[in-house]
Image (tube, coloured by chain):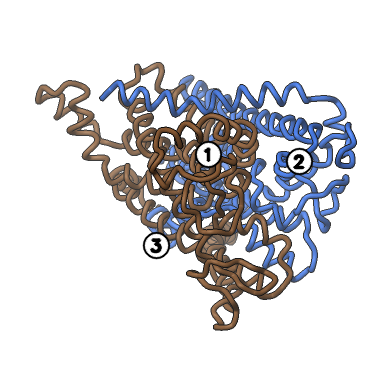
Chain colours: A brown, B blue
Amino acid sequence: MPETPADRAYRGYTTLSAIAIPALVCVLAVLIARAALPALAADSGVSVIGRTWDVGRGQFGLLPALVGTLTTSFFALCIAAPLGLGAAVVAAELAPRPLRAPLAFLLDLLAAIPSVVYGLWALAVVVPLLRTRVMPALADAFPNAALVAGPQYGPSMLAAVLVLAIMILPYISAVAREVLLAVPRTQRDAALALGATRWEMIRDAVLPYARTGLIGGVMLGLGRALGETMAVTMVIGNRHTLPTSLFEPGYTLSSLLANEFGEASAEGHVSALMAAACLLLGVTLLVNGLAQWLVWRTQHGRIGDHRGAD
Amino acid sequence: MQGLLWTAAVLAVLPLVAIVTHIVGSGFAALSTSLFFKSPAPAGVSGGGMANGIAGTLLLVAMASVIGLPLGIGAGLFLAERAGTRLARITRFVADVLSGLPSIVLGIVAWELIVRPSGQFSAIAGGVALGALMLPLVARATEEMVRLVPNALRESALALGYSQWRTSLTVVLRTALPGVLTAVLVALARVAGETAPLLFTALGNAYWSLNPTEPIAALPLQIFSYAQSPYDDQRAQAWAGAFLLLVLIAGLSLIARLVVRARQRLLRAGPSRTDAP
């Protein structure tokens, strides 16, 4: 059938919409890079390895925030990855069939709670708990560990780590569950036919097959943690020093932006914050791109066999 | 080992229980009619409400939909119908990466695009930031839903002499509509609770305003500022606001689930309802 003008209009509309997404990302990258450009000048005072942040004197050292972002995300991942993967295996494989959907629903619900609500809860419940119970207990249990030494205020890197772990857990388990469900039936049947128990089938046939995708899911969680803003800003204490212990207050790139961007007026301050945004964007893009690729590789068999272009 | 895995699952769900009980407990207690009908009282003065924040959030979400929905659904249609093309592959990948970016970055972009040139914070800038946030979510979900429509349906429409666009919009998209609607509701729920992109776009406002060119209040922004307030009244309102936000989000997801279930029932009932063109 020949293409009518209406067909062409429809095709133009969908094509333009599809172009809009990559175009948006290009605009985003160019705008932020352009705004951060002045920070590259030698006299801008912006330094990725600088430790001092003093707006009045034009010193913008990004190291404390960068280290804060990386360490809080790393520790959060150490907690959330095993729990999230475990929950995913239960929700996808182990739980009795009628329980699986509700469990997945609960985890999805956890992912739908807004960041600021997590922050509110953490500020009212987690932080006081840390101050009165957890921090003294940890300090008593490991008197020589530098990681848990220092003042016990409450708002701290540790609080940020815990909130982040709770927040990224449902993302990890949602992706991991999808990946596990994508493992082909034949893979399972083959293991069962060889006499494997259900657990042996999961351990020897399902998990190795899904490994790449599971790693991807964990990295997606890492990407979330790196960029998470509100909840962290509310509990981390927002202090511009290089933290030496989890008990100390710290800063992250995203909470730096959340706190200072709205009030930045000096040209140098804005470009320093834009440089922080660039750094944040670079780190999350790297982690997310890699994660998407890993997940895509595991699911490729399933995604690739859809009907092609018509 | 299995015991460990079960422990992990329980530990994973535990925070949800803790958070929800706390919010329902503290939030429900702080609910009052003035919360819905009054703007905030000056700090330290008791009374007042979050009417401006509720209205602001609704307006921001509406503006985000105006941007995010047409483009998102269009892109989703493209991704599903021209799945194999290079543009589709690029868009799909970029959309996934975009939805993983920190949302505060979209706030910065809207600031640079709108707030900086115009010289003032505005509701429009907030709407644009939220719309950009919605775009990849709607696109990817629409794609998934359109792909579920059996190819035979498309082919029958074409065989009956329907043109491409009519087939796509009145047959394929219409069949996928409940699913797409679900995806839209989920995306709305997501952006309604976003705070970070609004911090330096919509900014927040202590007074009632629906002017799109001025700073506007939003529920998440009010929760954020009240959460750290020294006044008991404001902290209580933060919990009430969180409760409202949670009800809004749970309500949207619940409607979405009901839509899906109704659709599944219809599909099981067979194709008799297809009112043939």
What distance separates the C-alpha of mark 1 from that of mark 2?
20 Å
Q: Which residue is mark 3?
A: B86
Looking at marks 3 and 2 on the same chain, the residue that comes earlier in the sequence is marked by 3
Chain that bears disc 2: B
Q: Amino acid at mark 2?
A: Ser
Q: Residues within 10 Å of mark 1 (few under 14, many from 20)?
A: many
Q: Which residue is mark 1?
A: A163
Location of residue B27 (image quadrant) = top right
Chain that bears disc 3: B
Label 1: state its secondary structure. helix
Compared to residue A139, the image places residue B67 above or below, namely: below
Q: Do circles 1 and 2 both sit on a common chain?
A: no
Left or right: residue A217 versus residue B17 is: left
Location of residue A251 (image quadrant) = bottom right
Q: Amino acid at mark 1?
A: Val
Q: Mark 3 or mark 1, which is nearer to you? A: 1
Image quadrant where one finds the C terminus of chain B: top right
Q: Are marks 3 and 2 in contact (CB under 8 Å)?
A: no
Left or right: residue B201 versus residue B109 is: right
* Residue B106: x %, y % from top left: 61, 58
Q: Residues within 10 Å of mark 3 (few under 14, many from 20)?
A: few
Q: Do circles 3 and 1 both sit on a common chain?
A: no
Label 3: state its secondary structure. helix
Taking the spot 69% from the left edge, 52% from the top edge, the residue there is B198
**Which mark is drawn over residue B229?**
2
